[in-house]
Image (cartoon, rainbow, N blue to C red):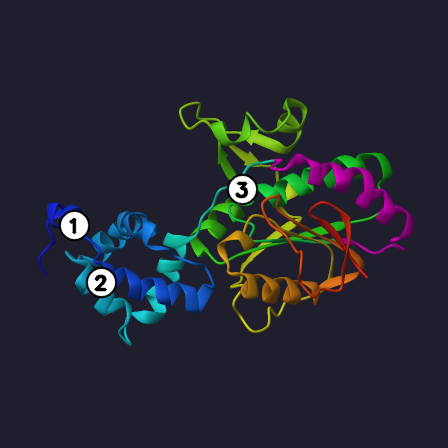
Amino acid sequence: MAIVNLRDIYKAELSEEHFDKLARLIMNETGIKMPPVKRVMVQSRLKKRLRELNMSSFDDYVKYAFSEEGFQTEVVHIFDVISTNKTDFFREPVHFSFLRDIILPEFSLGNNGKALKVWSAACSSGEEAVTTAMVINEFLNETHNFDYAIHGTDISTHILRMASNGVYSEDRVKPAVPEILLRKYFMKSKDPARKTYRVVPELRQKIKYSRLNFMDDGYNMPEKYDLIFCRNVLIYFDRPTQESVVSKLCHYLKPGGYIIHGHSESFIGMQLPLKAIRPTIFQMV
């Protein structure tokens, strides 16, 4: 097979017709809205797949992606391409203050030897889960009276591999993680040219990651949780989909458990078995 000229890939354009077809697929399969303004972004990100598949046009790619042969493979790559992975350590710090000051002391008093279970839904590259683990570990340094486990889920297989590795660039870690926690919970690469940090095994073993699509009928999670983070992902769904997703999340929330959404999101008007505790923080009734 002849190798496609990279110039042809560079010149390839995603037509409105092909973008609309991909956008409908994305909406139907993930619930994520893809307005026309996203066409250039999708075009740019999918060019990597053109190179990998040795294709010179989006016409060829879309035909392949919707073929019986290509669909199962490409749908995962398309989801990886459109996933927005904006996240930081200690993002929206008031939530982690609430975890430290309210949730953990409450659980410490009434856990009866049970482990604290946390679900980081739409976990992206793992910063939220790792931040949660650091906060819990710091609390346990003083109390030592319960164990914990964190489950991170995301639709993107690519981003989940990054999360599982627990390796972050210096510019992701240094501005956000306090120096005392950086020294305690991260290992700096021995190669100074790499400028990376890796989460210590003590924390990595407390976090497991798996793939989950919010549009699935049932999430088939292995257990119920004391705390669910679902932050800054609902904004990509329409209102009925938002309520459907949160309702399914609530199915996995223990009585008295907490669910936290992002500051740009709202549960107002949704019929949910929750009571408001603080802005963005709700408790199962």
Residue 72 placed where, x, y %?
36, 70
Residue 95 in the image, given as x and y percentages of width and height: 70, 41
Task: Inspect the image, locate mark 1, and give the three-letter code of the amino acid beneath it.
Answer: Ile
Q: In which quarter of the image is the N terminus?
A: bottom left
> Magenta span covers which residues?
90-116
Q: Earlier in the sequence, mark 2 or mark 1?
A: 1
43 with respect to 223 (left or right): left
Q: Which residue is drawn at 74% across and 36% down?
A: 97
Q: Is mark 3 on a helix, strand or loop?
A: loop
Eye-nearest disc, 2 or 3? 2
Spatial CA span between label 1 and label 3: 33 Å
Query: Residue at position x 56%, y 66% from top?
Result: 240
Residue 226 seen by the camera = yes
Q: Residue at x 33, y 50 (%)?
A: 37
Q: Which of marks 1 and 3 is nearer the N terminus?
A: 1
For the residues labelled 2 and 1, the Cα–Cα distance comes to 11 Å
Disc 2 target residue: 61
Where is mark 3, residue-wise? Answer: 166
Residue contact at pointers 2 and 1, CB within 8 angstroms: no
Of tags 1 and 3, which is closer to the observer? 1
Q: Looking at the image, which residue is at 85% across and 42% down?
A: 105
- The three-letter code of the residue at mark 3 reads Gly
Give the vertical position of 152 relative to 254 (above or below): above
The part of the image, by quadrant, that contains residue 268 is: bottom right
Q: Nearer the viewer, residue 277 or 217?
A: 277
